[in-house]
Amino acid sequence: MKKPVTIKEIAKKLDLSFSTVSRALHEHPSISVATQQRVKETADELGYQRNQKAIFFQQGKTFTIGVILPEIAENFFATAISAIEDIAYKKNYTVLLVQSHDDEEREKLLVEKLKSHRIDGLLVSVAKKTSNFDHFEQLKKYGVPVVYFDRVPPIKNIHYVACNIETGSIEAVNFLLKRGHRNIGLINGPTSLIASGQRKEGYIKALQKNRLKFDPSLVINCDLTKEGTIAAMDTLLNHKRRPTAIVSFNDYVSAFAIKHAHQIGLKVNEEIEFVSFANSPITEYMAFPPLASVEQFPAVQGQKAIDTLLDLIKNDDDDEDQAFYKIVIDSELIEHINK
């Protein structure tokens, strides 16, 4: 196997000192542009490759960031990671992508594995089952900044990028109220997610603004699985004030709920109507899609999340009194009625 070309070989060929060649390769201002060019051309001719480990050691960085997502199969996260990788590529960063599969123990293990790879920073959308967030907080001890996006944990002093779910929820309920519905159910997510609380708050505010009484029994929290959604649907459909419309946590939950309603003989979009969140492409392939869905702009969230993380890495601010990035993107209700 051919040995890698060294700086000494380049220096010997050009009759220059080792230090001059080294400075030229690092574009040091003490070396003329002409000499830098000559050194780089010779290095390319000889097939010289810079020692990345030495560069990382010198700069104190690995130019690698970690990303933990719940499920890459979900269109929202697939869109977000695509935007994240595009920016990372342009900034010469490598992305280590892992999936928690919404499992807290797996998430903890992934944090440890990424830390052992000496990542410069971490982007994360937390698992829906995670209730303790110490594994992320401990990264502060190692100087690894963390930026949360979309699924943001309910803890203080964190950097995050999120969509304004509350206003989206208000729009969703208002949309159904204008269609004449007065009994509106909400299939919500786990209480551990901030987004679940935001959906509920928007739901309550929209009802109260329209002088309608809030009935807490019409809000059902579920684990976002098919089984959990079906159980939530059955609870609502057996309610004494049976809903004529339902707001669901996301399009996947909406798909589970709509299919179940259809299977038990309900006329979807006649006897019962749905509005959802995420505005995923899957709605285009559903026989009975939700009438509207709240767009949460995953690409924008991904872009702003990595921009924030790279800024934190660049500034390397160890000040305990630092300001925390709290970026909130406006949501938008997208109607599917006329599609």
Image (cartoon, helix red, strand yellow):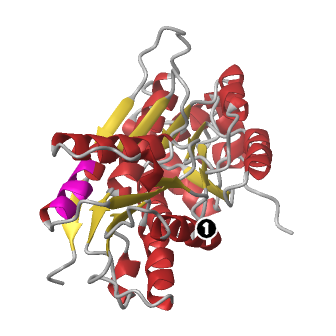
Horizontally, residue 163 falls left or right of residue 71, namely left
Q: Is residue 45 magenta?
A: no
Where residue 98 appears, x then y in whole percent?
Answer: 67, 57
**Residue at x 64% of width, y 61% of height:** 46
In which quadrant of the rendered view does residue 249 lie? bottom left
Q: Which residues are drawn in magenta?
A: 170-177
**Depth check, front residue: 181 or 202:** 181
**Depth check, front residue: 154 or 97:** 154
Where residue 35 appears, x then y in whole percent?
Answer: 45, 40
In which quadrant of the rendered view does residue 174 lie? bottom left
Horizontally, residue 278 falls left or right of residue 121, namely left
Where residue 15 appears, x then y in whole percent?
Answer: 62, 41
Query: Which residue has dot 1 on it?
Result: 225
**Depth check, front residue: 172 or 3:** 172
**What secondary structure prevails in the magenta region?**
helix
**Residue at x 68% of width, y 38% of height:** 131
Q: Is residue 252 above or below residue 212?
A: below
Q: How many marks?
A: 1
Image quadrant in which the N terminus is located: bottom right
Q: Is residue 292 above or below residue 313?
A: below
